[in-house]
Amino acid sequence: MTRSSLTTPPPGAVAPAAPPGAPRPGAALGSHYGRCFGCGTEHPTGLHLKARTPDGATVEAEFTVGEAHQGAPGLAHGGVLAAAMDEVIGMSVYLFHKPYVTGRLETDYLQPVPVGTTLHLRAWCNGIAGRKAYLEAEGRIGAPDGPVAVRAAALFIEVSMEHFAAHGDLAAIAAEHQDFEVNP
């Protein structure tokens, strides 16, 4: 994948370090919000990504492309694949216990993904510079070492929880994130 200068870490970007209390290697990662389209267990047509961290720094997840996820007959919608990339990348930044939002997402589609296919996703952070995190992900068909169907590079921006309180549903944030101060 050829990344733009907007998703390439600048000189001096540092590899992220796991904070105290970070998930241990092999740990399953829960949903950050029950109704999230990407990882929420309560979203009726969502991706329902089930993620884990094999090493405390990367995230692996799977989802099976369902009927609700198709674009062309029998094939995954490109926007759904981009959403899967965005979600697994966001989960990898979530490992650092800081809230981030997507600033830019570049997605390359290498081959079609049929309905019924399990897509194996992996994401990692290439570096952090100030509030900017530079990340990548790939999605493989059928197995963790299967053919690459989709790749992504992203720029995520660290924000405060007040960002979500100001622009989202404060009550829902407070209900699911008691460990964060969300009162602006």
Image (cartoon, rainbow, N blue to C red):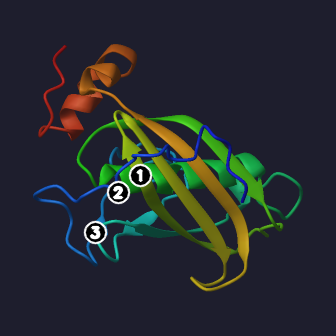
- Does 53 appear above or below 159? below
Q: Earlier in the sequence, mark 3 or mark 1?
A: 3
Say whether marks 2 and 3 touch (CB < 8 Å).
Answer: no
Question: Could you say where residue 149 lies in the image, as x and y percent from the top left?
Answer: 74, 69
Residue in the image at 15% along x and 34% along y: 180
Residue 17 image-quadrant placement: bottom left
Question: Could you say where residue 66 lies in the image, as x and y percent from the top left?
Answer: 68, 63
What amino acid type should be assigned to the residue bearing mark 3? Gly
Q: Which residue is mark 2?
A: 15
**Quadrant housing the N terminus:** bottom right
Q: Is residue 45 left or right of residue 69?
A: left
Q: CA distance from mark 2 to mark 3?
A: 13 Å
Q: CA distance from mark 3 to mark 1?
A: 15 Å
In-front residue for pair 22/112: 22
In the rendering, which numbered label is found on residue 56? 3
Q: Is residue 63 left or right of residue 151?
A: left
Residue in the image at 28% along x and 78% along y: 26
Say whether marks 3 and 1 touch (CB < 8 Å).
Answer: no
Q: Is residue 146 left or right of residue 36?
A: right
Residue 16 shows up from this direction: yes
Residue in the image at 82% along x and 51% along y: 71
Q: CA distance from mark 1 to mark 2?
A: 4 Å
Q: Which residue is mark 1?
A: 127
Helix, strand or loop for disc 3: loop
Residue in the image at 30% along x and 59% along y: 30
Question: Could you say where residue 29 lies in the image, as x and y percent from the top left?
Answer: 31, 63
What amino acid type should be assigned to the residue bearing mark 1? Gly
